[in-house]
Image (spheres, rainbow, N blue to C red):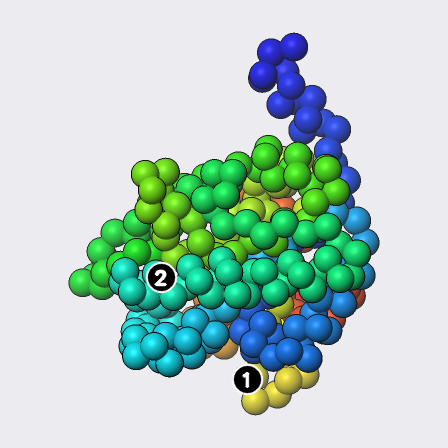
Amino acid sequence: MDNTNSRESLKEVHREVLTVVKVGGAVVEDEQCLKLLLDNFAAIPGRKVLVHGGGRRATKIAAALGIESKMVNGRRITDAAMLEIVTMVYGGLVNKNMVAGLQARGINALGLTGADMDVIRAHKRPVKDGVDFGLVGDVDQVDGESLSRLVEMGVTPVMAPLTHDGKGQLLNTNADTIAAETAKALATYFDVTLIFTFEENGVLRNPDDADSVIPIITHADFYKYMAEGIIAGGMIPKIENALAAIDAGVSRVIITKAETMNGEQGTIIKR
């Protein structure tokens, strides 16, 4: 059988459910929150992938080493010194603590950056509007076939927000983007649900009211809420990633609190 037919057969066979969960923020930083998160993630039935951030931890460690963190619109400027920090924190400290925690819960986890197995390639983000983000990567491709084979072997990938350019350069890459691009690549092989978790119950209509969750957001709703200022700041790229994932074949995208990742609570993103 030639490679093309082999890939087509793989696509036809692997349509079982797979859940991609992205975690970050305070959940990753707090020991008790992290334990609860890993409990909830381990309890998700079926195949799964975990994508994590860790920016707050990176900022703290950088400060302790006398390295200033510079941000533009919530995005980290990554020079050579900061890349060393995020590589140590994301690819090492945070990633391996999560892998160890999942192993303790009976989940055969494998920590990965984009450079491992060449699973995610990216290019350095070009200078735009006078802003140079430095060694920050925008994703070009995700090797969904290799990831799907790992998952089929019973492995749960735990993915750090680091990619590479194929020429030896590591790149700091947004974790929401890693999660969305990974979900899109795996949607060829599985029935994928993508869950973005953070500190709130979902996308809020009123940031001062934790119960004002918007239950459903479509493309049209997104532009309407942006125009009204209801969706702003860091929530904009998160929902952009979610909508792109839906358009690319991901079955469901949910934005919710880490504690409720196993249920139907939160905001559901639909086409």
Q: Which callout, 1 or 2, points to the residue nearer the camera?
A: 2
Image quadrant where one finds the N terminus:
top right
Residue at 64% in and 19% down = 6
Q: Amino acid at mark 1?
A: Pro
Q: Residue at x 48, y 74 (%)?
A: 57
**Which label belongs to residue 84?**
2
Circles 1, 2 touching at the beta carbon (< 8 Å): no
Q: Is residue 98 above or below residue 228?
A: above
Nearer to us in this view, 56 or 21: 56
**Circle 2: is it few (<14), some (14-19), or many (20+) Cα within 10 Å?**
some
Residue 60 placement (x, y as % from top left): 42, 79
Give the x, y percent position of residue 46. 79, 49
Question: Label 2 sits on what residue type?
Answer: Glu
User: Is there any visible trace of residue 171 in the rendered image?
Assistant: yes
| Residue ID at (70%, 45%) | 155
| 184 sits left or right of 69 in the view | right
Q: Position of residue 106 (x, y in %)?
A: 79, 56
As measured in the structure, the alpha-carbon distance from the residue carrying label 1 to the one carrying label 2 is 35 Å
- Neighbours of disc 1 within 10 Å: few (<14), some (14-19), many (20+): few
Q: Which residue is mark 1?
A: 207
